[in-house]
Image (cartoon, grey):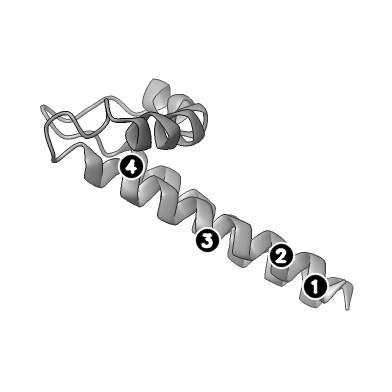
Amino acid sequence: MAVLFNLLTTAMEIYSWILIIYILLSWFPGARESSFGEILGRMAEPFLEPFRKIIPPLGMIDISPIVAILVLRFASAGLWELYRIIV
């Protein structure tokens, strides 16, 4: 059981790093249009899209990815709390 929870939290951590890298690509012109950027976009955009619908950008700054990463971190912590309750 611990292996499953560890695997899930590791996957969430890797996905949060994918989101961070995808966000950082926006600082470099044309980086998101590269093949690497497109692959990351296909992985990140489905998760970021609902947050972008809920949270409007503040001028030129989009804070929805920060909220999405926080949600992943809280979900990961919640999984470990669930594991502690089960075991």
- The residue tagged with tag 4: helix, strand or loop? helix
Question: Mark 4 or mark 2: which comes first in sequence?
Answer: 2
SS at badge 3: helix
Q: Residue 11: x, y in percent?
A: 61, 57
- Label 4 or label 3, whichever comes before in sequence order: 3
* Residue pictured at 33% horizontal, 42% vertical: 22
Q: Answer yes or no: do the residues labelled 1 and 4 have beta carbons within 8 Å?
A: no
> Between marks 4 and 3, how big is the CA–CA gap?
14 Å
Residue marked by disc 1: 3
Callout 2 touching callout 1 (CB < 8 Å) = yes
According to the picture, the residue beneath numbered tag 4 turns out to be: 22
Mark 1 or 4, nearer chain start: 1
N-term-proximal mark, 2 vs 3: 2
Label 1 crowd bin: few (<14), some (14–19), many (20+), radius 10 Å: few
Q: Which residue is mark 3?
A: 13
Q: Quadrant of residue 9?
A: bottom right
Q: Is residue 10 visible?
A: yes
Q: Of the residues shown, which amino acid type is indicated by label 3? A: Glu
Q: Are marks 2 and 3 in contact (CB under 8 Å)?
A: no
Residue 47 appears at what percent x and percent y? 51, 33
**x and y percentages locating residue 53 in the rendered image:** 40, 21
